[in-house]
Image (tube, grey):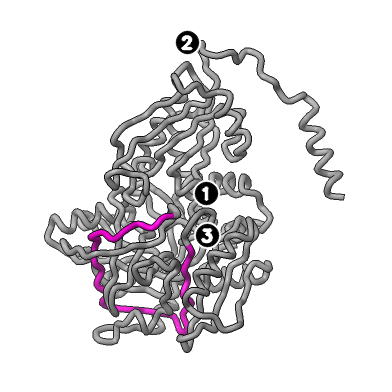
Amino acid sequence: MAYDDLRSYLQALDEEGQLLRITEEVAPEPDLGAAANAVSRLGEGAPALYFDNVTGFTDARIALNAHGSWSNHAIAMGMPADSTTKEQVDEFIRRWEDFPVAPERRENPPWADNSLEGDDVDLFRVLPLFRLNDGDGGFYLDKAAVVSRDPEDPDNFDKQNVGTYRLEVKGRNKLGMQPVPMHDIALHLGKAEQRGEDLPVAITLGNDPVMTVVAGTPLGYEQSEYEMAGALRGAPAPIATAPLTGLDVPWGSEVVLEGVIEGRKREIEGPFGEFTGHYSGGRNMTVVRIDRIHHRTDPIFESLYLGMPWTEIDYLIGPATCVPLYQQLKAEFPEVQAVNAMYTHGLLAIVSTKKRYGGFAKAVGLRTMTTPHGLGYCKMVIVVDEDVDPFNLPQVMWALSTKVNPDGDLVNLPNMSVLELDPGSQPPGISNKLVIDATTPVAPDARGHYSQPVRDLPETAHWIGKLQQMMRK
């Protein structure tokens, strides 16, 4: 089933027993952040949370952890709630092959019910803002989708980007935004500033669940997020036109903010508890001026908790990181079998591959680091044989402990690019990167003694099925 808005998705979660309504009165801080932190510790079937009785707010509706478990992620994809991680990644890959699916433009978007402009633009009056972690430098919008276009080719639909970037509320009509240099919006902004222009943006909050997934997916510069959303939904993504900027935005959003990133203007933004599980400090970042606010009647404010994994963001961007890397590698190296890049948005990736010749696995690892996503992430790549499941960590650890000789299986690349949020980079944005070849050597590489591997007995597969059936009785 394809959900056209956040509300229908929350209703589906509720019907599946995956939405927990908190009716008692809670404090915005620390209760909301602490509850979202706590629910992520409940395991792979954790529910979403819904609050509507928050001290200090007269009419707040807040959703947290909407994507924060494999059960919720499966429901977002229209799959059974008990679908395994592997099944979800495999289905993600299958649907990816349907790209592109043209979006459907609709009239009368629900977010157009209420519009504010001029002196009425006040983020604090529309949004129930709160800090997620006590060290955050302010209130953040951390689950919004930001829409922008290439200012040199504004009519090219495929160069319109929809991405997720952290946004600090700095005033009634002002946000601070961190555009990571490797992301498309940074390219758009750079072109606008070279032309001496501001960059128009539309910021959408409370989106349908697949649109939120796609906004965090590393696509190619000319791959449309809306066309990818259609492929992953199995139905065209509904979009509408934002009246002030003319940008295409999700039809079912709860809130749409229109404005500009002010060219060549920077202010201190941060700190913020990031997906790396560490705070990133204050830095000079771009400034967004909000000129118009649109919102549904009784809007739902959606946010997510970030901290030491696993939290909601890891479920949200896990498959969405694995599959693009897999597709890009598979196109050039058909030997690649699977990619697990679920760890800290792919700062660590595990790739399984067949091999053509000695040293081939190292080439696969190096190529992983030079994909569009790998340039800013993929700080460490572990390459394993095709019979090792990269999603099975005991198997990966076996490969690391038995296949790796540090004398010849480590490729250390100095002074490579990485996103500035990586707490291990020094200076920020620069790090050594490492390929670990945990594959069995093949000719002409004749190192080690791997000629007599222990294989599963031929009858093992039969017994796996038989025992699983017996356990279900």
Q: Residue at x 26, y 54 (%)?
A: 186
Res 319 label: 1
- Of callouts 3 and 1, the N-terminal one: 3
Secondary-structure class at tag 1: helix
Kindly check if marks 2 and 3 are in contact, taking CB atoms under 8 A apart as contact. Answer: no
Quarter occupied by residue 136: bottom left
Secondary-structure class at tag 3: helix
Res 444 label: 2
| Label 3 – label 1 distance at C-alpha | 13 Å
Q: Is residue 377 magenta?
A: no
Badge 3 is on which residue? 312
Q: Residue at x 57, y 61 (%)?
A: 40
Q: Nearer the viewer, residue 365 or 153?
A: 365
Residue 108 in view: no
The magenta span reads 278-305
Main SS, magenta region, reads strand
| Label 1 – label 2 distance at C-alpha | 35 Å
| Label 2 – label 3 distance at C-alpha | 45 Å
